C-alpha cells in the first residue's frame, strides 16, 4: 500500500504525504489528521515503519524502510474480526432463538447502531475481539523486536482495524510508548481506502509504466 510513497509527515492540521517514485513522479495526498498524531515524527528519511493491516480473516505485518519493503519482515497471521464473529455467532443465535445467521449478517448488525440486536452483538463479540487483539499484539511485538526496535512509527489500518480499535489500540500504544515508538492508528475514514490509495499511486507511476512496457516486450 505504501509502494513508491515517501513519508514526509508535517505537524499541522493537515498531514501531507509526498509520493516520490524513483525521483520522477511526485504527488500530494492530503489526509486531515489531528496534529498530535504526528508530533515528534522524524521528517528525514530513511523512515522505518511496520504496518499492521487488519482484515476479516488475516492480518499482515510488512515493514518498510522509506519506500522499500523489507523482504525479511513480510509475514501474516490468521487473525481478524471474522474469527471473533465465528467464536460467538452460535451463542448469539441461541440467545435470540435465531435459526440462521451468517458472519456477514452479524457484521452488519455490529455496524448498524440502530439494529435491535446491536448492543448485544457488541457485548458478545468484545471478549473474542480481545483475544484476536492479543494475538495481533503478540505478533506485532515480535516484528518490532526482530527489528531491534529501530522503528519510527507503527501504522495500523485495514477494514478490520475499525472494529478492532477498542480492543487493540490502547495495548499497542502502551507497548509503543515504552519503546519510544509513535503509533498511527488510522481513522475510520481512511482505514479501508489507504491500501487502494497506495495502489493508485503505484498504478499511475512511471515505474508501473516501465514494468508494463517490459512485460509487453517479453511477450
Image (spheres, rainbow, N blue to C red):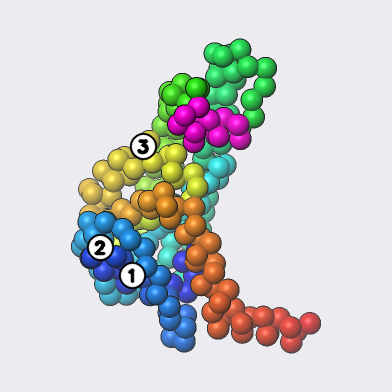
Q: Which quadrant of the figure contains the C terminus?
A: bottom right
Secondary structure category for the residue under label 3 = helix
- Per the image, the residue denoted by label 1 is 16
Work out whether mark 1 precedes mark 3 in sequence or the reverse, and give the earlier one.
Answer: 1
Toward the front, the furthest residue is 114
For the residues marked 1 and 3, what is the alpha-carbon distance in whole angstroms? 27 Å
- Per the image, the residue denoted by label 2 is 13
What residue is rendered at 47% in x and 83% in y? 25
Residue 198 in the image: state x and y as whole percent. Answer: 50, 66
- Per the image, the residue denoted by label 3 is 166
What residue is rendered at 58% in x and 73% in y? 203
Give the numbered dot on residue 160. none
Residue 90 in the image: state x and y as whole percent. Answer: 60, 20
Quick check: marks 3 and 2 in contact, CB under 8 Å? Answer: no
Magenta-colored span: 104-115
Q: Is residue 105 magenta?
A: yes
Could you tell me what secondary structure mostly forms the magenta stretch? helix
What residue is rendered at 61% in x and 84% in y? 210
Confirm whether residue 84 shows in the render: no
Residue 34 horizontal side relative to residue 20, left or right: left
Toward the right, the furthest residue is 219
Amino acid at each position: 500500500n505504501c509502494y513508491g510513497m515517501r513519508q514526509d509527515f508535517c505537524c499541522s492540521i493537515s498531514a501531507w504525504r509526498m509520493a516520490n517514485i524513483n525521483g520522477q513522479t511526485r504527488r500530494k495526498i492530503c489526509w486531515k489528521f489531528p496534529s498530535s498524531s504526528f508530533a515528534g515524527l522524524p521528517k528525514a528519511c530513511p523512515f522505518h515503519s511496520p504496518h499492521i493491516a487488519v482484515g476479516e480473516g488475516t492480518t499482515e505485518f510488512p515493514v518498510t524502510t522509506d519506500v522499500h519493503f523489507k523482504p525479511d519482515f513480510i509475514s501474516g497471521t490468521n487473525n481478524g474480526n471474522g474469527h471473533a464473529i465465528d467464536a460467538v455467532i452460535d451463542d448469539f443465535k441461541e440467545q435470540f432463538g435465531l435459526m440462521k445467521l451468517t458472519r456477514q449478517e452479524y457484521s452488519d448488525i455490529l455496524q448498524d447502531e440502530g439494529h435491535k440486536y446491536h448492543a448485544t452483538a457488541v457485548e458478545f463479540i468484545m471478549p473474542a475481539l480481545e483475544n484476536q487483539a492479543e494475538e495481533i499484539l503478540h505478533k506485532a511485538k515480535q516484528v518490532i523486536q526482530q527489528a531491534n526496535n529501530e522503528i519510527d512509527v507503527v501504522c495500523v489500518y485495514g477494514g478490520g482495524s475499525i472494529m478492532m480499535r477498542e480492543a487493540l489500540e490502547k495495548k499497542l500504544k502502551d507497548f509503543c510508548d515504552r519503546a519510544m515508538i509513535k503509533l498511527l492508528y488510522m481513522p475510520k475514514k481512511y482505514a479501508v481506502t489507504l491500501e487502494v490509495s497506495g495502489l493508485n499511486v503505484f498504478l499511475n507511476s512511471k515505474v508501473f509504466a516501465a514494468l508494463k512496457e517490459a512485460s509487453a516486450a517479453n511477450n
